[in-house]
Amino acid sequence: MLYSIIVFLRNKLFDWQILKSKKFDIPIISVGNITVGGTGKTPHIEYFIRKFLPQKRVAVLSRGYKRKTSGFVLADENATAQTIGDEPYQIYKKFPEILVAVDEKRVCGIEKLLALPTPPEVILLDDAFQHRYVTPSDNILLINYNRPIFKDKIMPYGRLREPISAIKRADKIIITKCPENLSEQEKKYFIEKINRVAPPCPPKGGELSPPFWGGVGGGAVSFSSFKYSIPKNIFTKEPMNTDVKRDFLVVTGVVNADGLYDYLQKFANNIYKMKFADHHNFTEENIKRIEQKVSTLPSESLVITTEKDRARLLDNPFISNELREKMFYVEIEVEMQN
């Protein structure tokens, strides 16, 4: 109750404009959620990067969760997961042609990006749905299909950062991690649930029609799923030989890796799981534990991890050359269903 009151009052201070929100002259697209992790923010940020490139100069601005620096940092060849955070580092390694920056104060970060000699033409804000000091051009809210907010509770009893009524602030909603070819009936279920929280109203300049929902002017509901790539070596990016079935030790430091386990089934004899907390920094003891487990498995066995975990393992000094050859990761790409 106390947490809910604090969140309610904070939002009202922004609604009443006692706390100020700044609007910028270029497109600022916020991608976030009201759930603590697990909605697929980074793959969706990458989806929008691909949509804008190469026509636009793109920047991604994040707060850089769990980094060991503070203030504004612009990614360059010296960047690591420790200096800018694992997710921004993952994005920077995959899209070196864009600007990737971190700043816990998003207004300051945007102003510094716009002051660069070649400023961006569009800025993607990572995990900024609750960061109301910026008024985005588009406020995109992600909801996990497997853990819908309608069945969740506010922290600490559940994983909601704020009440589900917050969806009224969204301009667009994406239901993420959906099964492929989600049925129209299931899509209708989500839209109806959203409409109960934000009653339908006509979009600007047109009639209300599905998949529009409520809110000021109406917003659109979309559905996305994940496409998994063939595992690649963490260090060399050499793809795994898929002709041989083998045992996998799946090492993860993410909220939920169920989709990864399901995907690997077709390549595996056995899957063993080693789970760490989200954004976990792997210590020497952790690496020794991984090596010890690998030593008990058949010689052709591999260690599989997520792309986000790869960002934190790339520069890990405790990984032996022998273990390096066995460590693979799986990339994720978003596919929109509508």
Image: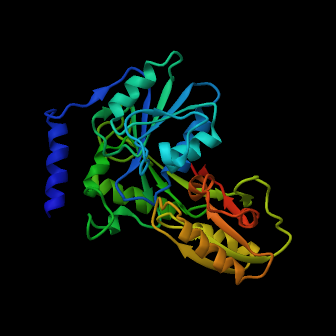
In this rendering, position of residue 336 left or right of residue 138: right
Q: Which residue is at 53% across, 35% downward? A: 75
Q: Which residue is at 26% across, 55% downward? A: 162
Q: Where is residue 311 in the image (x, y as percent from the top left)?
A: 58, 52
Judge by depth and name the residue closer to the eye, 166 or 265.
Answer: 265
Q: Where is residue 301 in the image (x, y as percent from the top left)?
A: 75, 75
Whether residue 61 is visible to the viewer of this picture, yes or no, is yes
Instruction: Give the quadrant of residue 217.
Output: top left
Instruction: Give the quadrant of residue 271.
Output: bottom right
- Give the residue at the far right of this rendering: 243
Judge by depth and name the residue closer to the eye, 204 or 151.
Answer: 151
Q: Position of residue 297 (x, y in %)?
A: 72, 82
Judge by depth and name the residue closer to the eye, 231 or 25.
Answer: 231
User: Where is 119 relative to 220, above or below?
Assistant: above
Image quarter in which the N terminus is found: bottom left
Q: Where is residue 276 in the image (x, y as percent from the top left)?
A: 49, 69
- Give the residue at the far bottom of this rendering: 296
